[in-house]
Amino acid sequence: MFLRSSAIGLVLLAATAAQAADFKWASTTDPQTLDPHAVNSAPVLGFLNNVYEGLVRRNQDMAVEPALAVSWEPIGDGEGWRFNLREGVTFHDGSDFTAEDVLFSYERASNEVADTNSWFAPVKEVKIVDDYTIDILTHGPNPIFPGSIANWMIMDSGWAEANAAALPDKDNGNYATLNANGTGAFRVTAREPGLRTVLEPFEGWWDDATHNITQAEFTPIQNPATAVAALLSGDVDMINPVPIQDAARLKESDEVEIIQGIEARVIMLGFPHEAEALKYGGDAGQPNPFKDVRVRQAVAHAINVPAILATIMRGNAEEASQLVSPAMSGYSAAHADRRAFDVDKAKALLDEAGYANGFSFGLKCPNDRYLNDEAVCQAVVSMLAQIGITAELDAMPVRNYWPELREDNYDMYLLGWSPGTFDAEHPIRFLVTTPNPDKKLGSWNFGGFSNARVDELLPLIQAELDAGKRQAMLDEVTQIIQDEQTYVPLYVQPLVWGTRNNVALTQRPDNFFILRWVNVN
Amino acid sequence: MLAYIIRRVFQSVIVLLVVGLVAFSMFRFVGDPIDNMLGQERTQADIDRLRTELGLDKPFPVQYFKFLQGAVEGNFGVSYRQGRPVSTIIAERAPATLELAAVSGFLAITLGIALGVFTAIRRQGFAANAIMTVSLIGVSLPTFLIGILLIYIFSVELDLLPSFGRGETVKIGNWSTGFLTASGLKALILPAITLGLYQMTLIMRLVRSEMLEVLRADYVRFARARGLTDRVINFRHALKNTLVPVITVTGLQLGSIIAFAIITETVFQWPGVGLLFINAIQFVDIPVMAAYLMLISVMFVSINLIVDLLYYAIDPRLRIDGRTA
């Protein structure tokens, strides 16, 4: 069944255009499902972006552009959005794409059992106007809505119902877990979970194909050394990621190229804002010094981010001044400077706060979540030692890390945040507003930071249609976060991919690998 | 005899239950699967709901009991990561591991015995000394390093063999085999050497020392006095008598070849059950981890049981014990 004799392969190769090529790539994580609504994680959504499409999609520069919708406009005074759908689009199995499928995909993706349901929190109702027009009504004005649904992928209602996959089933799996039927540029021709997934171009795709791939095969390779060897030996054409310590060595090879960029993810230090006492270190049980803003500012001044980037990141990352990178919409250009590295100032601030003799506390850190995360934490520990505060580092695998943070078992922690909507509103909603489970706010605000003005501004930002006014409010929140030093943003994580030197592709800051931009020469 | 077998089987079952209990008590420290299963935008309510659904809010003896209930019916649950029955996933992955283990076992036994005999007969020769020295590498270098070295030499530098994976496979019923395609056979070479090297050197050294002992025995000297050829003496008389301990050790090593394939499979991205287990640990996929650990312990326990029964058949003293007990 999986045998493709080399003779057939040769015939196929000869039969296709001279430029056409087979393409193999590897990454550390296998997408755990092919169901676009079951799991909201980057490996799954990134992979499925090649197979399924949304009403809108993001182009090479992350800007939103039409996909299954040709155009969209606000309804009335911010009551929602009307999407005019593309005609003549077919799914991989040949059935037609209509508004019915959009409504079905909304119901499927917003269901309680779907991991993607939080995307639809602002949606009140979805109404079919005619076969190629659909209205999405929101609870209030929602200017960023079209941009927030770029990963909401449309599934064929007939196909899903015929195969008993009308709802995603993450726990037990169903037909859509292993099979896919999208409208995208590639269709899945073989799927062996954890082993390999084969894609072939969809002949009936509505858009013009700009790639020259005849067949693409994805293999998860967990061991970074094996992945690098596979790239060097030509067994694969592209790997993501390249271990940062191997990047310089690979750059010297004639056969491979290193593609570097900046990811959307900002790495930061977080504090307990509510805790009364320290929990770890020599001063466990003593009052929590991080409740004092001067101590938090002192930490920011104490950390020499350029040194971290030069040594641990080998010059591959950029400093961060706020919770989003400059590539995101809503980035506050007025607050582009982070607190300067200044040991004297940090000491003065500690002195002022009454900690001239320093204190001892516990720093929690993951060791397999972000690039070189443990090394970064070790650097933070030594930099804090210079201003007289002693951090006891406790690094652990991420599977143990999140439960610890949820239990408030930390005095300081490391966190990375990549805004799913590529907008500055996203981290404010999840990391800065006062936690409120009912409204699904502040769900990653482990430290319990609370600021009335931020809470007041968030709904206004979400509803503001005027870009200038919206940015002014985002600037104000960024100012508050910087003044209050809610977090200490450190740097924007780098993206390092490796390719054979005959491969041309586009690296997007969301770390999605889009096959339709690949050309093999 | 029957009483002896029943007693041994009963003991094996107890061992299995204890292994399972220890495994389940440790799963709590492996981490929390919830964060891997829910996306970034999850809420506390989602976390609580999923935890209840999966039964993770229950104490571990209860979880263990539920697992046992299912396992008795042949149901190992559904993988958290893949959303498919664990038994299906393991059945898919087992052929890769078993084929790799069979080839490495075969390599280890044939080469190990051949080199062992050679180094015993040509004790003083240059080649024998060289082999003995090199074999130290096989015993002392860790598997992952040997694997990476082999990949570097044969894939990256010489470009002769694939650096990862199993090549093309052919499906025969539910069994996917790599034996029938050129790329499948090529892909087997490096992992099989990596996995079998340690066992090979072990068998080689064992055969060599046994041979040296036997060659000094009286009956070999008498055979020589009778004027038999070296060939007959070495292979008919000496080798045969060295094989008894070798077979015992080999039997036990077979289990560890399968169990320790984990490292080789990770280095070569070999799609077997060992790699599945490593992935399961990273994702805290408890049903897969539990099933794998139980399978491996069943395997070890059965091998030990068979070896015990063989002893019983061979060694008359055990039979006497069995009667008096």
Image (spheres, coloured by chain):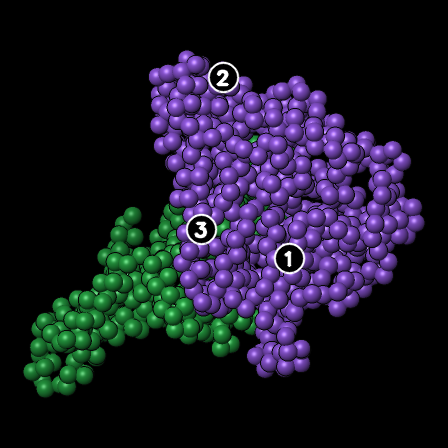
Chain colours: A purple, B green
Q: Position of residue B65 (x, y in %)?
A: 52, 39
On screen, residue B49 versus residue B103, left or right, reads right
- Residue type at mark 3: give it: Ile
At numbered mark 3, what does the secondary structure look like: helix, strand or loop?
Answer: helix
Residue designated by label 1: A514
**Amino acid type shown at disc 2:** Asp
How many circles with numbers are drawn on the protein? 3
Q: Residue furthest left?
A: B225
**Residue at x 77%, y 37% (from the top left corner):** A143
Q: Where is residue A334 in the image (x, y as percent from the top left)?
A: 62, 32
Which residue sits at x=49%, y=72%? B184
Q: Mark 2 points at which residue?
A: A292
In terms of depth relative to the viewer, which is nearer, A250 or B56?
A250
Q: Residue A244 carries which label?
A: 3
Would residue B207 be found to the left or right of residue B39 on screen? left
User: Which of pointers 1 and 3 lies earlier in the amino acid sequence?
Assistant: 3
